[in-house]
Amino acid sequence: MSSAISRNINYSLVVVGDLFLTKSKAAQTRMLRDLKVFLGERVRVPVISSDELQEKYFFGGKQVIQFFVFIALCAGIFWGVFSHQERIIDFLQAYKGVKLVAVVAVGLFAPLFAYFYGTVAHLFLKMIKFD
């Protein structure tokens, strides 16, 4: 196989398909990984398997479910924050020993919401093939 790939041709990506199908799953995984490393060193371009290509660039059923679940979570968080904003502001402005709890709550809540919102944005761009 390595003789089929020439160093004289400029490749931008090498995709390795289903190989070693007669071997066990563990042996397939190991041999495919070794082949990808060998080809990557030989032609000095990224080498990925067809499964990784499918997972990275194509929008599938798993991503649709994840997209809608995270949209629902973001909408629920927006609804919860905006419908209870007076209580949230009172909680954040409390000065009697609760300030540390308020800081920890915001410190945990903000990255979690950023993850949900960022995942929705990423999946939306992937869905419209802009990623």
Image (cartoon, rainbow, N blue to C red):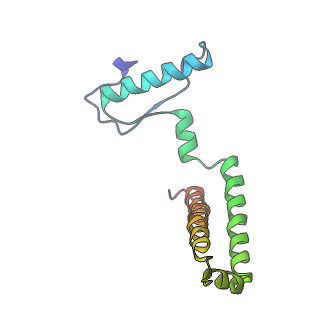
The foreground one among 73 and 100 is: 100
Position of residue 13 relative to residue 95, above or below, is above
From the top left corner, tell me how far across and down residue 41 is, in percent: 32, 27
From the top left corner, tell me how far across and down residue 83 is, in percent: 74, 82
Q: Is residue 106 left or right of residue 86?
A: left
From the top left corner, tell me how far across and down residue 5 is, in percent: 35, 24
The foreground one among 60 and 114 is: 114
The foreground one among 39 and 85 is: 85
Q: How many marks?
A: 0
From the top left corner, tell me how far across and down residue 72 is, in percent: 73, 65
| Residue 51 falls in image quadrant | top right
Q: Is residue 91 left or right of residue 51?
A: right
| Residue 55 falls in image quadrant | top right
Q: Is residue 37 left or right of residue 85?
A: left
Position of residue 127 relative to residue 93, above or below, is above
Residue at 59% x, 13% y is 23
Screen quadrant of the N terminus = top left
Position of residue 90 relative to residue 68, above or below, is below
Which residue sits furthest top? 22
Which residue sits furthest left? 8
Which residue sits furthest front? 96
| Residue 39 falls in image quadrant | top left
Residue at 66% x, 47% y is 60
